[in-house]
Amino acid sequence: MKRTLAVIVASAALVVSACGSKEDLGGSGQQAASGEVVVGSADFTENKILAEIYAGALKATGATVSVRSGIGARELVVKALQDKSLGVVPEYTGNLLNYFDKTNTTTEAEEVYTALKSKTPAGLEVLEKSDAEDKDVLVVTKATADGGVKSIADLGSGKYALGAAGEWAQRWETKVKDLYGVTFTEIKTTDAGGPITVDALKNGTVQVINLYTTSADIKANGFVELEDPKTMYPAQNIVPLLRSDAVDAKGKEALDKVSAALTTENLADLVKRVDVDKETVANVAADFLKTVTL
Amino acid sequence: MTAVGDIAKYLGDAGTRAALLDMLLDHVYLSLVPLVVSVVLAVLLGLLCHRFRQVNATLIGMSNIVYTIPSLALFAIIPALIGTQVLDPLNVIIALTVYTTALLVRPVAEALAAVPAHVTAAATAMGFRPLRRFLTVELPLSVPVLAAGVRVGSVSNISLVSVGALIGTGGLGTLFTDGFRQRYLAPIIIGIVLTLVLALVVDLLLVLLRNRLTPWARVGKP
Amino acid sequence: MIFADAFAWLLDPVNWSGGKSIPVRVGIHLLYCLGAVLGASLIAVPLGLYVGHTGRGGVVLVGGSNALRALPTLGLVTFLYLIAGGGTVGVLIGLIVLAVPPILAGAYAGIQDVDRGVVDAARGMGMTGSQRLWRVEVPNALPLLVGGLRNATLQVVATASVAAYVGIETLGRPLLDGLRVLDYGQFVGGAILIAVLAVVLDVVLAGVGRLVVPAGLRLSAAPAGRTRSRRTQRGRREEPVPVESGGSTA
């Protein structure tokens, strides 16, 4: 049975690649090798905006660029860079370092960046980091905060349920226990700072959620960010991660200029324009690029 | 209503309209290539089923099992099985081909089996070799059944492609994930409407094609 | 190798206890699927029987049910989540919409395919419309009706994984989580669970079908082609029950 299935799949693959070679499917991996730069993004608004900004900056240098948006979590994105489906992705220094070096304990911005540069696998590289930062942050409702929860340390042991993306537990469950002695009654899988996460906090399914500091939802819902005095969450400066051979020197220079122009404030504003004002990612990115001299 | 206003605002942007067209074309490509490939595969496999009883039982059993695999799972496991890139549209195309072929094999085998014995006997008596007999007599006679299967296959492919958005290759499905994250109904509504319209248009074309291929079906009708 | 990882995940005791354990997820998955198939049956069976019996509205029914098939479940589920402000209702409706067309097709085709001669005979015996429907047409339609239910169940079980995207803890959770971080063990493990669940439900429904379908009908219930002759022979040997008595037991 398995053999028959293999035959079906293989012959299908043959036929499809035969007809597929003539077709042009925007952003398909096959074109990546022939000089086109594919910019990828993870599945949340800010990352999509950054990808669109990178794409615009690269286009301005004369490169052929396409965007593959909303791919998933870091693991998938890095894999896609390595197998040449993608050329460049917007990344975050701290989490990227933790991904490349599971034993990392560095959290301060410069140290993280230095360590990241040395830990990035061969074939990939990170460019200059931006001052703009988008950190993970645990937030609670105003009511919970008024009840005396101001810092991660106040969460105590087994008192609250947490809502976060699927990979949170794997990355942080042990660290939050070691640093603060905090455990949760339940770590509910929601999404990466999206509607499921926010609604879970609003309707009381969980009492703490993991969001990102540039998220428009924090202000819109009056959520309170918990302090992180022992810096569990590392610095998360925005940084382009790329496959070295995918982008030329001019392109790298353009991306460095973008990073220099980005600040946490203007990034948060771009996110708000998309998530709250429903402007398009493309327009918001284009507006931003007008303010950068490439 | 705000939804109407939102949709007008959403469609008012030229960049968005261009992006919508791209997604629509991707969607057509992702859903119809598997359809065409599976018709060919299903006819070949159906022929095998028809000729060899052993193959018949195996294939029919297998095609039932294929349908229990969640589409999301099939989309994502293909790179690990055959070494394609994780974001390659081929993953979705191959997965949908597997589903559609599974859907078509059984009706095709049954349609071939249902060709009356006296018809094939007549063709043989007229000196038709098996291949010619298959291509000019048995296959055309099974077109109505094949067409019915292809219509179901096209509709379900067009609706299934959207799930690919969860792995970054979703055609119009991207509108659902984007709209959801932004809590924005406009792209979701437009995605649903475009999917329905696409399914309808393809279905109409398939009906026309079927009528074209089965001229005898019109004989005797007023 | 992938399958070894998947079995490692499936056998890991960690995944068998607590609020996110495999049994809990199987339960939630089942609950949504049963709810959806039940809900869809309540809509589709009466509608299919009515249209099949009266012969009115057949074209509208087929067209409408094809349009339903084209509705993308992911789109529907996200749309309804945003409107209803939660996943439960959206997922249920999304799955019901998915299950209606096959059940409708089964009920409608079942009634349609009943030999007109049989129905005429019933009329000739003086049966009223509803007697004909319940004592002749429905029993005769059962094989196709159960077939429709089985198709619907297969599709719903496989598709309920999409529910995890809007935060419902079905078996789609390990699928989506595994996918996010490319943990193939978790991912394929989840897929295997869903496939097994679908097969088990299908076998159960096939059994139910065998119980409720009148014995005499199994002769005609066998699919066309080569298999028909084989099954008919076997059926004759095993079930020497005349058609008439089969009809009246239902």
Image (cartoon, rainbow, N blue to C red):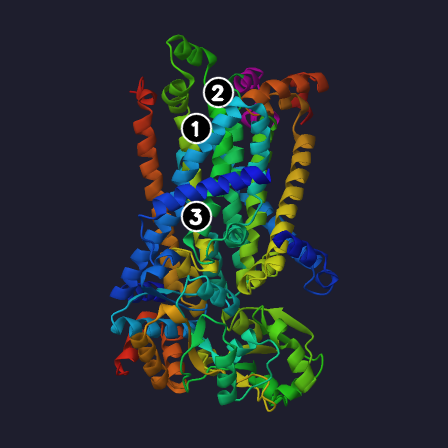
The residue positioned farthest toward the front in the image shown: A122
Q: In the rendering, which numbered label is found on residue B145?
A: 1
Please indicate, yes or no, whether residue C62 appears anywhere in the rendered image: no
Q: Main secondary structure of the magenta part?
A: helix
| Residue C120 lies within the magenta run | yes
Label annotation for residue B161: none
Image location of residue A247, percent across then percent down: 34, 71
Q: Is residue B18 left or right of residue C132?
A: left
* The N terminus of chain A, quarter of image: top right
Q: Residue at x 43, y 38 (%)?
A: B38
Q: Which quadrant is home to the C terminus of chain A?
A: bottom left
Amino acid type indicated by mark 3 = Ile
Residue at 49% over, 43% down: A9
Q: Which residues are magenta?
A: C118-137
Residue B67 image-quadrant placement: top right
Name the residue beneath numbered marker 2.
B114
Q: Name the spot of residue B22 as percent of width and height, x first.
A: 31, 57
Question: In the rendered image of this protein, does residue C80 appear above or below residue A245?
Answer: above
Could you tell me if the residues under marks 2 and 1 are in contact, i.e. CB atoms within 8 Å?
yes
Compared to residue A115, the image places residue B88 above or below, namely above
| Type of amino acid under label 2 | Ala
**Secondary structure state at the residue bearing disc 3:** helix
Report the residue marked by disc 3. B93
Answer with left or right where residue C230 lies relative to residue A85. right
Establish if B214 lies above or below A84. above
